[in-house]
Amino acid sequence: MSDNLHAPSPSELTAPARETEQPPFYVVSRGKFFTLYILTLGLYQLYWAYKNWKCFERSSGERLWPVARAFFSIFFTHSLYRQADNRLKQDGRAFEWRPGTLATLFVVAMLISNLLDALVRKNIGFPLTDAASLAILPVTAWITWRGQRGLNAAAGDPEGHGNARFSALNYVFIVIGALLLALACFGLTLPPEV
């Protein structure tokens, strides 16, 4: 025991356990991810990108502008996945996920989705473009999920158990999204405008 009454205790001198740190990336379970991605008609992707960059910003201490990186995710997903892969290697964890390929697939899927959405807004190719726009939604969700698996692993929660429960706000978006999805599907059954 030290004679200095103002000296910190040995427990205060040790570094905090890694489990108490903020995760370096957004963690989410597969069920929650797919439910929110599909039922928000892909808008969850914006939140997903924002949360990943916000977590990384807090963890790294860098100033990153997470909102801008979320809106322009096609330009920043390669970097996000590269950061996660670096974290996995730094921690000595092996995880097979091909971050560069997944980021490229994400960019291609988002460009195709945006093109289809632009055609739908201009009413070009009805009903095929409308159907294709809805059909690509689970494809972009699956590609994004494949990347999220690597982010979960880099955050130390490969299955996303830390964020598997739905919040009240999640349920609000699920209900609104389900209604919009039902309306979109119903709209495909209507005859084209003359």
Image (cartoon, rainbow, N blue to C red):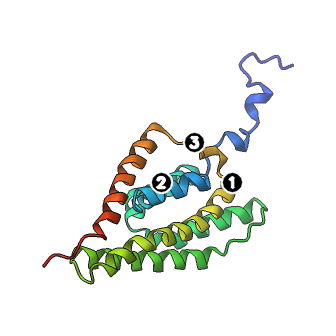
Q: Which mark, residue 128? A: none
Upstream in the sequence, badge 3 or badge 1? 1
Instruction: Kindly indicate the quadrant of the structure image that contains residue 41.
Output: bottom left
**Residue 22 visible in the displayed image:** no
Q: Residue 59, percent across and down? A: 58, 51
Location of mark 3 (residue)? 165
Looking at the rendered structure, the kind of residue marked 2 is Leu
Local crowd at mark 2 within 10 Å, few (<14), some, or many (≥20)? many
Residue ID at (30%, 70%): 189
Residue at the spot x=31%, y=63% of the render? 186
Residue with the mark numbered 1: 159
Horizontally, residue 33 falls left or right of residue 185, namely right
- Residue farthest along the bottom direction in this orientation: 125
Does the rendering let one see residue 176? Answer: yes
- Eyeballing the image, is 28 above or below 84? above
Q: Is residue 148 above or below residue 108?
A: above
Name the residue type under label 1: Glu
Q: Quadrant of residue 69?
A: bottom left
At horizontal 62% and vertical 49% (from top left) the residue drawn is: 23
Q: 127 or 119, which is in the foreground?
A: 127
- In the picture, which quadrant includes the N terminus? top right
Q: Dividing the picture into quarters, in which one does residue 126 lie?
A: bottom left
Residue 193, x across and y down, in percent: 16, 75
